[in-house]
Amino acid sequence: MPSVSVVIPTYNRPHLLPRAIESAFAAGTDVEVVVVDDASSDETAEVCHAIRGIKYVRLEHNQGVAGARNVGVLASSSEYIALLDDDDVRLPGSLDLQLTALKESDAALIYGQALFGGATDRVAHDRYPQPCPSGDVFWQLLTQNFIPSGSVILRRSCLFSTGLFNRSLAGIDDWDLWLRIAATHRVAALDQPVLIWRRPSPISDQGSARAVEIVRLSTKQFRQGWLKMTRVAEAPLQMRRKAARQFSQNMASHLACEALRSLSYGQVLSANRCVLAALRFHPYGLADRALRKLRLRYVS
C-alpha cells in the first residue's frame, strides 16, 4: 500500500498536468498518483498514457472537479489521500512532512500554506494563510475558507464517514467538506509552504475566478445549509449572529478585493459586477469593512 494517494482531476490542461504529476511524486516517498481525466476533449489522454507510474481514470462524461475528485478517491488505495489541482505544484518533500505530522496527531486532516503563483511561473513570497489555525477550527472555518485544497491530506476513514465532495456545490465543494469534517474532528496544520497555487485572475477561465458566482453560492449555502448544521443550530444565538456578521464581512472584503484586481487588469465591467454583488448580498458587511478602514485611518 502506498504511503499517500494524490488525486489530480484534470480537464483540457495537458500543458500543465505533467508538472503537477512530477511535483506529486517529488513531494513524498512511495506516492500513488491518481489522475482523473474529466472527459477532456484534447490530447490529455495521450499525455497521460505517456507518463509512467500513474493510475489513469478516464470519465466519459464531465462531472466537474468535485465529481472527478470523488472518482479519484474511490480509485485510490492509500489510507491517506491528498488533493492536487492540475495547475498547481506540490513542493518537494511536503507530503512526507505533513504525513508525519498527521500520523502523530488525532486530527482528521492536515493542511499547509500556499505560495501564490501565476501563468508566467513567477512565484510570490506571500504565504496563505497566515497564521494557520489548528485544533477546533469550525467557527473560524464557517466564516472563511482558509484551507488551500491542494495543501490537504485527509484520513481515508474520516473522509468516508463524513461523506465525499458535494457535486452541487461546484467551486465551494472543498469548503463544504472541510466544514463537515471540522464540525466533529480536529484539524492539524503545517505552518510552512507546501504548495504553489496558480491563483486565478479576472481574465482566466478558472471556475474560482468567478467571484460573484462563488459568493452567491457561498451565501446561499451559508444561509440554507451551514447555519442548519447541528453544531451551529445548537449554539447560542449570540455566537450564531457573530458568525453571520463575520461571514458577511469576509464575503464583502473578498468582492472588494476582486473588484480592485479586476480594475488592475482593465476589467471595468467585472469590477462593477463585484461591487454590485457586494451591495446586493452583503451591504452591511461592506459598510462594516469601510467603517473599519476609516477607524484605522483615524487612529493612525
Image (cartoon, rainbow, N blue to C red):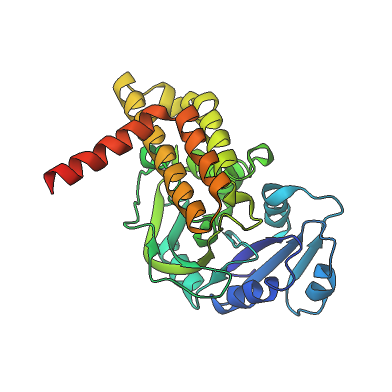
Q: Residue at x 39, y 42 (%)?
A: 253
**Residue 243: x percent and y percent?**
36, 31
On the image, the x and y values in percent for residue 44 come to 80, 68
Residue 9 rendering spot, x and y as whole percentages: 69, 59
Above/below status of 130 relative to 45: above
- Quick one: which residue is furthest to the left in this view? 299
Q: Does residue 23 appear left or right of residue 10 in this picture?
A: left
Residue 161 versus residue 263 in the image, above or below: above
User: Left or right: 197 with respect to 50?
Assistant: left
Q: How many marks?
A: 0
Left or right? Give the position of 32 relative to 200. right
* Quarter of the N terminus within the rendering: bottom right
Is any part of residue 162 visible from this angle?
no
Q: Nearer the viewer, residue 207 or 9?
A: 207
Q: Quadrant of residue 82?
A: bottom right
Name which residue lies at 55% across and 31% down. Answer: 221
Residue shown at 67%/69% (left/top)?
33
Residue furthest toward the top? 237
Indicate whether 282 appears above or below 82.
above
Return the x and y of residue 137 as percentages of the image width and height. Answer: 37, 44
Q: Nearer the viewer, residue 1 or 218?
A: 218
Residue 217 visible? The answer is yes
